[in-house]
Image (cartoon, grey):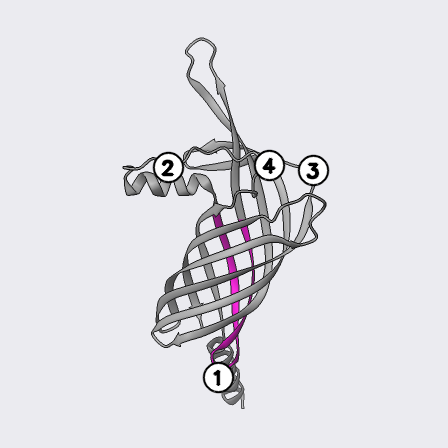
Amino acid sequence: MLLRCLGLLTGTSIAIWAQAGVSFFGGAAIPGESVNDIYNRASVASGDTVRSLLREAIRMGYHIGVRTQTALSGRFHFIGGIALVRFPQSRIHVVDPQSRDTVVTLVSVQNLVPISAGIEFALLPEIVRLTVSAQLSYTLLNSSTDMERGELSIPLAIGTQNQHRVGGDVGVGAGVALGPVGIGVEVRYAISNLIGRTGGEQRKGYLSVLAIVRLGL
């Protein structure tokens, strides 16, 4: 009886795992014109190396997060998750008055935390995957003062004024799945404030290019 119960539980767990999954993603985020009102990064010069372009993309912004997938029917899946999107705005260089060396660089950063839910459709659901998806998101917008370390920055002080907006995003992804593990890339375009804008507030959109590791489903 005990072995039968264990077998039933194991089979149920496998069935549930086969119908659900989780993805971890991260990559560069490119802000639209109105994401940062004082966005002042210099444009990338022609002739830069690939390494320089990647470094500049990270400085422009980055997007990391996690989401779950649950099979609905056929090729349709429910997706939902949470992410962090950060855009540097302006830099203050603290300089040693004697040596004139930069001691530390402080960065003003726009932070977005979208909590999203939507639908994903698998155009190619086999080993080679091609998907399109759309989500609605509840987004927390805030600012912080960071200390820059290498290509990324570490928050020192979080702003006290939080804003909340309803937005949305669409995306297309491609990848390969080997059993329960898959890897891929995804391009998403998001508008963080479709609903709830105050007078004179412009739409804040951004484009993300993401690498994805997918477990299950």
- Specify the quadrant that holds the N terminus: bottom right
Q: Nearer the viewer, residue 167 or 143?
A: 167
Residue at horizontal 46 percent and vertical 34 percent from the top: 41
Q: Secondary structure at mark 3?
A: loop
Mark 2 and mark 1: Cα distance apart in space: 54 Å
Residue at horizontal 71 percent and vertical 46 percent from the top: 198
Residue neighbourhood size for the residue with mark 4, other residues' Cα within 10 Å, grouped as few (<14), some (14–19), many (≥20): some
Q: Which mark is residue 44?
A: 2
Residue 56 x, y percent position in the rendering = 39, 39
The residue at which mark 4 appears reads as 144
Sequence-earlier tag: 2 or 4 = 2
Residue at horizontal 57 percent and vertical 40 percent from the top: 110
**Extent of the magenta region:** 62-84
The residue at which mark 3 appears reads as 160
Mark 4 and mark 3: Cα distance apart in space: 9 Å
Task: Please name the predominant secondary structure of the magenta segment in the image.
Answer: strand
Circles 2 and 1, Cβ within 8 Å, touching? The answer is: no
Query: Which amino acid, mark 1?
Result: Gly
Circles 4 and 1, Cβ within 8 Å, touching? The answer is: no
